[in-house]
Amino acid sequence: MANIELDGKTYPLSIVVGTEQEKAFDISNLRSQTGYITLDDGYGNTGSCQSKITFIDGEKGILRYRGIPIEELAEKSSFIETAYLLIYGSLPNQKQMTTFSDLLTEYQYIHEDMRYHFQGFPTGAHPMAILSAMINAASCFDDGLMHWRWGRGCQFERYAARLLSQVRTIAAFSYRKSGGLPMIYPRRSLKFTENFLHMMFSKPFEDFDMKPEVARALDLIFLLHADHEQNCSTATVRLVASSQANLFASASAGVCALWGPLHGGANQAVVEMLEEIHREGDDGSRFIAAAKDKTSGRRLMGFGHRVYRNYDPRARIIKGACDAVLAALNIDDPLLAIAKHLEEAALRDSYFVERKLYPNVDFYSGIIMRALSIPVEMFPVIFAIGRMPGWIANYREIMEDPKSRIYRPRQVYMGAPLNHYVPIEQRT
Ligand code: ACO
């Protein structure tokens, strides 16, 4: 128990202790007892829920899905197995895995009428805009989603598999549409990630040359993005879900939140930054100087994190994969050398050291995606496909919690005091 003293009175606050000894004061009754709220711009110090899905220790650089270290999953698991782990809480046995994979295969096609929606977008439209719109539009093609009520009979397993499977089809179609290319349909014989690559890169009557290193690297990127506790997009999904909106509507909002350059759009911003440095013949020092200057409007993209004050463990894995993929594909990308140089220089620089700014997951992932010939506008889309299991798991968690209430933060009003309407002719 902790006490808070206000105006000479003491109010007890109960303490919540997490599995890994994370501690929180429960302030949920503070306002009704004291008239005060807590103020925490950007929620940097606010726990919005109790969750059993993902654990992060930002100081130590630890990330675990359902208790399993990310390093073990990256080495031994696949994206789809990890998706099951996140959504259902434990690794699947063989029968559960087969049922899950069969459902993903069954739902890989989108409604044929949805193809006409794609035609309405201009060529060159950003695939994140198309993705978000089309995930939401998919609700209209299913009565179960249009009249969604969480609970027995809502067939969550089917809808979860459908969302996970169809997001990949919609994502690939978004890419084809934005480039003015003909749609390539999914194929039942292919696994999740191979199927995505097929829809992205096969041509009519000419199959994509599927290199196992490429499929494995992309699967790893999906896996490493699969969840990351209460980040901006997941918190958005939970917020929308708290109003009892359906699964697809909530995920579509997650895509919008993910799009911004400070979140899922950072991987695109990193490659654009590296390209600019390369184009200008800078060895990175000029860019680093600009990133440290608050008036320049620049930041070292792919560096820093709200939670990690240490090396992001996903960045470490991706950096290793980056070297392996480029070697396997025999690619010599000058951007990799620039990225490594930037990292070394920043990690020696007192500005970054003092602020504990380290590479995050986005710093090297873009270089792998470039090597796989994925265009930069698709980088946040790849992130969205990867993050889908985390959003689904968080959606399920909020829906299954009998204590869950609609998310409704408070504010401290700093605007004008009471004012009165003045007719237009009397206004100066
Ligand atoms: N380059 C230069 N300075 C930085 C950077 C950066 N990348 N990141 C943070 N800083 C500075 C801030 O200016 C601030 O300096 P100050 O204390 O002198 O004012 C200090 O470090 C603390 O930064 P905050 O803005 O408080 O960090 P916050 O937690 O709000 O933001 C964020 C985290 C958005 C990730 C930030 O580090 C950033 O903009 N990074 C670049 C974008 C990026 O890589 N985003 C991807 C994040 S990972 C993901 O979403 C998957």
Image (cartoon, helix red, strand yellow):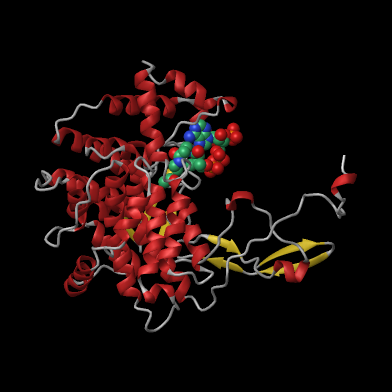
Residue 137 on image: x %, y %: 40, 62
- Who's the residue at 42% across and 42% down the image? 265
Inspect this view and state whether residue 53 appears: no
- How many badges with numbers are in the image? 0
Task: Compare residues 34 and 267 and report the one nearer the observer.
Answer: 267
Of the 4 image quadrants, the one containing the N terminus is bottom right
Report the residue that reaches farthest toward the front. 425
Report the residue that reaches farthest toward the bottom. 152
* Image vertical order of residue 303 relative to residue 161, above or below: above
Position of residue 187 in the picture relative to residue 380 (left or right) = left
Residue 143 on image: x %, y %: 38, 76
Position of residue 369 in the picture relative to residue 140 (left or right) = left
* Image vertical order of residue 154 relative to residue 107, above or below: below
- Who's the residue at 50% across and 21% down the image? 289
Task: Compare residues 357 and 329 and report the one nearer the observer.
Answer: 329
Report the residue that reaches farthest toward the top. 281
Q: Quadrant of residue 311?
A: top left
Of the 4 image quadrants, the one containing the C terminus is top right
Inspect this view and state whether residue 116 appears: yes
Task: Compare residues 200 and 320 and report the one nearer the observer.
Answer: 200
Residue 209 on image: x %, y %: 10, 43
Residue 378 on image: x %, y %: 33, 43
* Image vertical order of residue 295 relative to residue 160, above or below: above
Q: Quadrant of residue 412?
A: bottom right
Position of residue 306 in the picture relative to residue 385 (left or right) = right
